Amino acid sequence: MSTSTATKRTPLPAALENELEEVFGDRFTTAEAMRRQHGEGESFHANEPPDAVVFPESTAEVSAAIGACHRHDVPMIGFGAGTSLEGHVAALRGGVTIATSGLTRLVELHPEDMDCRVEAGMTRMALEQHLKGTGLFFPIDPGADASLGGMAATGASGTTTVRYGTMRENVLGLTVVLPDGTVIRTGGRARKSSAGYDLTRLFLGSEGTIGIITEVLLRLHGIPEAIASAVCSFPTLADAVDAVIYTIHSGVPIARVELLDEVQMDAVNRYSDFDYPVRPTLFFEFHGTAGGVEEQSTEVGLIAKELGGTDFEWATRAEERSRLWAARHEAYYASLALRPGARGWATDVCVPISSLADCLLKTREAIDAEGLLAPIVAHAGDGNFHVLFIVDPDDEEEMARAKRVNARMIEQAIAVGGTCTGEHGVGYGKIPYLLAQHGDAVDAMRSIKEALDPKRLMNPGKVVA
């Protein structure tokens, strides 16, 4: 089984239960099914349910719930859409989960300034619906239909990072409820500011350990005049990575470039009814004017050809592109289908682009040497790659082999100046590697945690536990 740092729990104080029931009515529950639903994300980590779940519908109600928990010294855990991968939402010390799924309003939209403010429970695809007809879109696409508050809390990114950046570059401000119930707003709609500490970036990626995000002020982008997607397979992983490196060095502003190894392509073919070659494959997307897209794709096509790549298979109509990228986004479930009954352990690292080929090849060799089933997917344009171990968590010997590969991959990434996680976050699954990456800087992180959450009630056991 996965290892957790859960400690002995104490029952919720009756006074707290009464207080929360009085404020929230039937939006406060201690039902076992609901507690278990909110005790895990989408990974192999053990389910650690809270003692209760509350469903606020406004920032004021989040503040009321947090304030009550703070007064009674009860841990609290923020919960968005439950798509996290490193045990972020596990209630390791019990307590109350504060689910933001009821905070779904579009608070304000300013098309002329290309920004909007949304409540934290709104999902990425729901925002897409709100933006129809405006000529704008929000580009961060982690694959899952995650909540925007959760994406901010974990510092999410995804397939479009190479062109549009991560949540850190696309969040202008936040509304956050601090551990004692105080509500603050960070940032603002101006595109730059030198006024004081950058608290927005402090809370981005903090994983609910120093506050719960209730609103997110987002930077929007204009929908490109032309969009085209293409698929190209290569003889080897190294050839595919080299094609990406040469493309970036050539200054081509690609919007997406995803690398799937041969194991992942086999899974995609089976699951999504494609018949692509079972070889390392790049999924490209180009944004711009019609002439610009044609120029970009021609240049990349020539680069790919020089490295043994096949001719591009094109998808220019919206429905064709949607099917293509749906297959990429379903890679997780396609991989699970290779071994019915198994669980997925998704892990990631991010390295400088120049080190990507070496790290990928060594990881693939280690996976094969350990006899594991583990497809690889990479956001190749920014050096971030994912390994999905398809494992039986109850098989200790198999888990030990997977952990060896994971540790080796992370150690190699850190050694070349990379990070133990590019976008999954730390949760409790990657705590052991945070010190290896940041050294004494982790003490500074703990000091911030201690200053804002001296009772250590906010998502305890995570990140700097």
Image: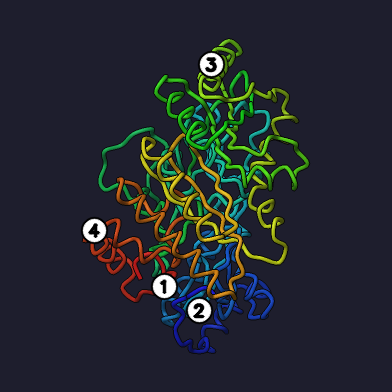
Circle 1 residue: 460
Determine which residue is flagged by label 2: 95
Q: Which mark is drawn over residue 441?
A: 4
Point out residue 232 in the picture as x, y percentages from the top left corner: 61, 28
Three-letter amino acid code of the residue under disc 3: Leu
- Look at the picture and state if 226 lies above or below 455: above
Q: Which residue is mark 3?
A: 302
Residue 92 rendering spot, x and y as whole percentages: 48, 77
**Residue drawn at the location 69% of the way across and 51% of the way down:** 334
Q: Earlier in the sequence, mark 4 or mark 2?
A: 2
Rendering quarter of residue 35: bottom right
Count residues near mark 3 (Cα–Cα under 10 Å), then give few for <14, some for 14-19, many for 20+: some
Point out the tag, 1 or 4, that comes first from the N-terminus: 4
Which one is earlier in the sequence, the residue at label 4 or at label 3?
A: 3
Q: Is residue 110 above or below residue 363?
A: above
Q: CA distance from mark 4 to mark 3?
A: 45 Å
Give me the C-alpha separation between circle 3 and circle 1.
52 Å
Please report the residue visible at 61 percent of the width from the left and 69 percent of the height from the top.
Answer: 392
Distance from label 1 to label 2 (Cα)?
10 Å
Q: CA distance from mark 2 to mark 3?
A: 57 Å
Task: Identify which residue is drawn at 58% across, 71% down.
Answer: 393
Q: Which badge, 1 or 2, is on the more N-terminal residue?
A: 2
Number of the front mark, 2 or 3: 3
Please identify the residue farthest to the front as the structure is shown.
369
Q: Are marks 1 and 2 in contact (CB under 8 Å)?
A: yes
Q: Residues within 10 Å of mark 1 (few under 14, many from 20)?
A: many
Mark 1 belongs to which amino acid? Answer: Pro
